[in-house]
Amino acid sequence: MKKVTIKVDGMTGESDRRAANEALNGLSGVVAAGDGADFDEIDAYAGERLANKVMTDAVKSAGFPAYVIGEDYVYSPDNMFENNFF
């Protein structure tokens, strides 16, 4: 699983933030999306096969310019089997 931090421009209130989060949470492959470290950031947890562009496009379709500012590999039980840890 990966954690992708997305910078979202133009959000001015909680309703904007909710709309951007809902756009991401509506994607197949996104496990969870929620508030990031700063008001204009969203952290999305998704399967590694989901392209970052698909996520930023979803936020853009909600009306906000968006781009990836960070990506990290996150441990999940599924990763143990995918990477043959057993």
Image (cartoon, rainbow, N blue to C red):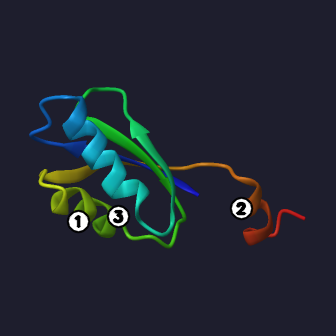
Q: Distance between the residues labelled 1 and 3?
A: 9 Å
Which of marks 3 and 2 precedes in the sequence? 3
Q: Is residue 65 left or right of residue 52?
A: left
Q: Is residue 84 above or below residue 9?
A: below
Q: Which residue is drawn at 81% across and 69% down?
A: 84
Kindly identify the amino acid type of the residue bearing the numbered disc 1: Asp
Q: Position of residue 81 (x, y in %)?
A: 80, 67
Which of marks 2 and 1 precedes in the sequence? 1
Quick one: SS at disc 3? helix
Q: Do the residues labelled 1 and 2 touch (CB within 8 Å)?
A: no
Which of marks 3 and 1 precedes in the sequence? 3
Residue pointed to by mark 2: 79
Q: Position of residue 29 (x, y in %)?
A: 51, 67
Kindly identify the amino acid type of the residue bearing the numbered disc 2: Asn
Q: Residue at x 60, y 48 (%)?
A: 74
Q: Which mark is residue 19?
A: none
Quick one: SS at disc 1? helix
The image quarter in which residue 83 lies: bottom right
Q: Which mark is residue 57?
A: 1
Q: Do the residues labelled 1 and 3 touch (CB within 8 Å)?
A: no
Q: Nearer the viewer, mark 1 or mark 3?
A: 1
Residue pointed to by mark 3: 52
